[in-house]
Image (cartoon, rainbow, N blue to C red):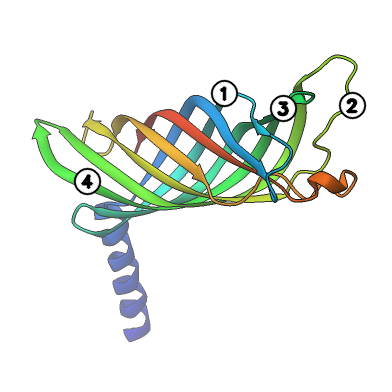
Amino acid sequence: MKRYLLVLSCFLTVTYFVAFAQDQIAVHISPGIAFGRVHTDPDTAGLASNGVGLGGKVGVMYDWNIKDNYYLSGGLAFSAQQIGVKNSTIQERHEIQYLQVPVLLKLYTSELELDLRGYAQIGFMGALKINNRVTTSLAGKEVFVTKLRMWEVGLLLGCGAEYNLSLFTSIFAGISYQLGLSSMLAAQRDNPPFSKLYGYGDLITLDIGVRF
């Protein structure tokens, strides 16, 4: 009898915490613009970033409430970024697709108005390359960048506002800046003068989503 009471007690406890937990799931789509920072070491090739291009992310996040208005967020996202290189003879751009694993600290304000509050988030993002393609290259020229790094690490900063539609559902909109901390480009061993080529990808996105 005591065993059944213990099982029942554990079941009721788990049910209570699940029913009243403030943890939530968020689904977002984040269109944006991608750009990069490119250089060689030593910097003798005159390389620069080849402008900006379209990018963005789509993903799902789990927000775990750790204290009051503080949340720890983790999840998965599909990300499309671009990196370009150019000098007097080279001009090309690559689109690289990643599977990202973000880990973020999210902080909410008190209500700014009825059912409306602001948020800020900061954290790191690890990513694995799943696909890539050349989107721009000078006609008749061989592709210069032939090797891309399989992984990437970035820092993410963001802010926005969230509006509660109901007790358990809200919508949000904000802006995020993802700063590349690791080079997207690997050593170009087929081009010894450019063997130490570095290209860091940055991404600015408009974040729109639903939390439930």
| Mark 3–mark 4 distance (CA, rounded to whole Å) | 45 Å
Q: Is mark 3 on a helix, strand or loop?
A: loop
Nearer to us of marks 3 and 2 is 3
Check disc 2 and report the residue beneath it: 142
Nearer to us of marks 3 and 4 is 3
Asked if disc 1 and disc 4 are in contact, CB closer than 8 Å, the reply is no
Check disc 3 and report the residue beneath it: 87
Asked if disc 2 and disc 1 are in contact, CB closer than 8 Å, the reply is no
Nearer to us of marks 3 and 1 is 3
Asked if disc 3 and disc 2 are in contact, CB closer than 8 Å, the reply is no
**Foreground residue, 141 or 108?**
141
Measured as percent of width and height from the top left, residue 170 is found at: 28, 33
Q: Which amino acid does label 3 sit on?
A: Asn
| Mark 3–mark 2 distance (CA, rounded to whole Å) | 14 Å
Instruction: Report whether 138 appears left or right of 153.
Output: right
Looking at this rendering, what residue extends furthest in the top direction?
139
Q: What residue type is labelled 1?
A: Val
Nearest to N terminus: mark 3 or mark 2: 3
The quarter of the picture where residue 65 lies is bottom left
Up/down of 203 relative to 62, above or below:
above
Nearest to N terminus: mark 4 or mark 2: 4
**Foreground residue, 90 or 142?**
90
